[in-house]
Image (cartoon, helix red, strand yellow):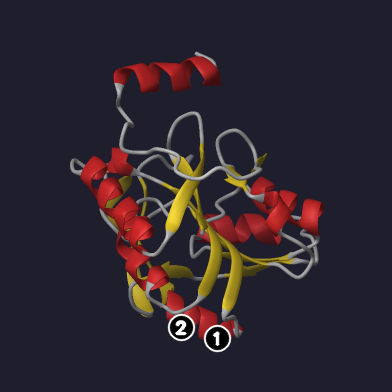
């Protein structure tokens, strides 16, 4: 099924009726079909700061950001497979990988590795895509600690693809008193029995901070917000 038919199917079924666009701005899709997001591109320039949480083995989104705007991308991923992959790539000078992830608090934590060893992404939290026994210790940092360490008080675009942990860290992101102009989140509600409710609550938190949805992928998982 192609992307347009997939989107139409989901709309007719009402499966993602809780994810609705509430803002209209010029936008472009950055990244590949399965690992990209909509971006309000006219708001970005060479001075823009981009945070990219969760890169795996795919930095097409990050490369597009740099290619189009010449901005700096600060990427974050604690996964050994991802770190090793990045070290083997010829990376743009504007791209820097921080070998830790985002969590509610800073510290060393147990990280669940994927059940399928062909996959890359793990998670701090047990879900149906990761192992409950195959775990490693990784370094994690809270959002406020990350921004203070890097010296940022304003972020132009923040992307999160963190395998279900988005529901836990969003409070720390929204309450950190950091000016974030755009936030893009890959929702992993399929990982949890109460996933739909988790997404509904996260969107409500975003609305309370004046963030509105302007871009939704065809599969309703990659959702982009802009602060009005």
* Quarter occupied by residue 220: top left
Q: Residue at x 35, y 43 (%)?
A: 115
Q: Does residue 103 lie above or below 64 as drawn?
A: below
Q: Which mark is residue 145?
A: 2
Kindly tell me whether residue 12 is visible in this rendering.
Answer: yes
* Quarter occupied by residue 88: bottom right
Q: Residue at x 30, y 27 (%)?
A: 15
Real-space Cα distance between discs 1 and 2?
6 Å
Relative side of 215 to 88, left or right: left
Relative side of 159 to 11, left or right: right
User: Of residues 43 and 151, which is closer to you in this image?
Assistant: 43
Q: Does residue 218 lie above or below 226 as drawn?
A: above
Secondary structure at numbered mark 2: helix
* Quarter occupied by residue 45: bottom right
Relative side of 136 to 155, left or right: left
The picture places residue 155, in percent across and down from the top left corner, at 59, 70
Report how many numbered discs are placed on residues in the image: 2
| Residue under pointer 1 | 149
Secondary structure at numbered mark 1: helix
Q: Does residue 204 lie above or below 168 as drawn?
A: above
Q: Does residue 138 lie above or below 65 as drawn?
A: below
User: Of residues 153 and 212, which is closer to you in this image?
Assistant: 212
Q: Residue at x 60, y 48 (%)?
A: 57
Mark 1 nearby-residue class (10 Å; few <14, some 14–19, many ≥20): few
The picture places residue 186, in percent across and down from the top left corner, at 45, 47
The picture places residue 11, in percent across and down from the top left corner, at 38, 22
Task: Say whether marks 1 and 2 touch (CB < 8 Å).
Answer: yes
Mark 2 nearby-residue class (10 Å; few <14, some 14–19, many ≥20): some
């Amino acid at each position: 099924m192609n992307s347009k038919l997939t989107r139409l199917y989901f709309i007719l079924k009402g499966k993602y009726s809780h994810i609705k666009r509430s803002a209209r701005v010029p936008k472009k899709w950055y990244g590949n079909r399965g690992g990209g997001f909509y971006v309000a591109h006219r708001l970005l320039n060479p001075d823009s700061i981009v945070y990219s949480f969760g890169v795996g083995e795919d930095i097409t989104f990050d490369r597009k950001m740099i290619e189009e705007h010449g901005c700096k991308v600060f990427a974050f991923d604690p996964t050994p497979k991802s770190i090793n992959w990045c070290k083997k790539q010829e990376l743009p000078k504007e791209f820097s990988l921080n070998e830790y992830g985002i969590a509610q608090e800073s510290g060393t934590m147990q990280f669940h590795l994927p059940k399928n060893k062909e996959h890359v992404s793990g998670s701090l939290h047990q879900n149906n895509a990761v192992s409950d026994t195959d775990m490693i210790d990784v370094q994690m940092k809270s959002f406020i600690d990350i921004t203070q360490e890097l010296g940022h008080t304003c972020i132009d675009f923040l992307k999160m693809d963190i395998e279900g942990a988005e529901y836990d860290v969003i409070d720390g992101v929204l309450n950190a008193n950091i000016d974030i102009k755009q936030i893009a989140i890959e929702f992993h509600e399929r990982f949890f029995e109460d996933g739909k409710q988790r997404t509904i609550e996260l969107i409500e938190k975003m609305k309370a901070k004046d963030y509105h949805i302007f871009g939704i992928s065809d599969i309703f998982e990659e959702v982009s917000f802009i602060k009005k």
